[in-house]
Amino acid sequence: MKKTLITSILIFSIFNLTSCLKKGGNDPLISLMSRKARLCGEWKVSHEKYVESNSYDSNGPINSYFQKICIYDGESKTCVTNGSGTSIGAPDSTGNMFYTYSYSNVSAKPEYYTEEYVFKKDDFFKFTHINQDGTTITYDGKWKFLQKGEETKNKEKIQLIIINYSQTDINGIANHLLPQNLSEVIIIKIDRLKNNEVILMKNEYKSSTAGGPAGYSSGASSSTTTTLRKPN
């Protein structure tokens, strides 16, 4: 009887230990809390990096390159763009139809805002974005961990299903129409999940093409890495 009890305790302990092993690439090796327990709670966005780039090369005179990097530090976001290329336009006085362009480290005006997430154990989530001028964006709905699939570990990604959306202007007038750049279903990879820190990674898009009679190549991508921390 005693031997059976000890064996049962060992099996139960191993099962719980396995469920608490790291799933994200930068998770703690072992945590005594489940991934759901670690994720549930109130979080403030403390840092975010957005990278967008695209390029086109015709293997001839027409080519272009563009990159935009935005950094958010928990209070303000600054964006810097770089680009260069040769394009075609109206002929100039000499009959030349091609023109070149380049711009380096062009900064946009900083944006000031705060963002917060709430994840609850009953699978409810809420996102809040508050601008310095008082305008807000909020949406909520259901969240869940995705199960193990192709190239995905169990509970490595979460799915957000947006049910309610609201955007208010400076007069407090609300618009509940979901904008085109926001999908009703969002898939996010969890790169790190600690008790007091979460790093989320999202690839908005990535594409590349090549071909044509003269040969060409083009590519575009964008990604966002977001760090969440528990409020003090």
Image (cartoon, grey):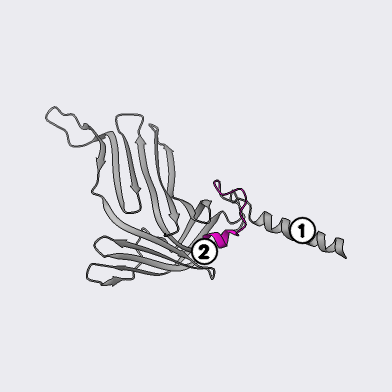
Query: Which residue is depicted at the point 23% across and 49% down?
Result: 109
Q: Indicate the quadrant containing the N terminus: top left, top right, bottom left or bottom right.
A: bottom right
Query: Which residue is depicted at the point 58% across and 58% down?
Result: 35
Q: Is residue 125 left or right of residue 82?
A: right
In this picture, is 162 found above or below 219?
below
The percent position of residue 160, horizontal first and vertical second, equals: 48, 62
Q: Is residue 138 left or right of residue 194?
A: left
Residue hosting label 1: 11
Q: Residue furthest top?
A: 94
Indicate yes or no whether the magenta region holds residue 34.
yes
Q: Which class describes the residues within 10 Å of circle 2: few (<14), some (14-19), or many (20+)? A: some
Q: Nearer the viewer, residue 17 or 84?
A: 17
The percent position of residue 70, horizontal first and vertical second, equals: 33, 46
In this picture, is 118 found above or below 157?
below
The percent position of residue 205, horizontal first and vertical second, equals: 43, 49
Where does the magenta region start and end?
A: 25-40
Q: Is residue 15 left or right of residue 37?
A: right
Looking at the rendered structure, the secondary structure element under dot 1 is helix
Pick whichever of labels 1 and 2 is earlier in the sequence.
1
Residue hosting label 2: 40
Question: Which residue type carries mark 1?
Answer: Ile
The percent position of residue 37, horizontal first and vertical second, equals: 56, 62
Question: Which residue type carries mark 2?
Answer: Cys
Q: Which mark is residue 82?
A: none
Query: Which residue is depicted at the point 37% across and 59% down?
Result: 115
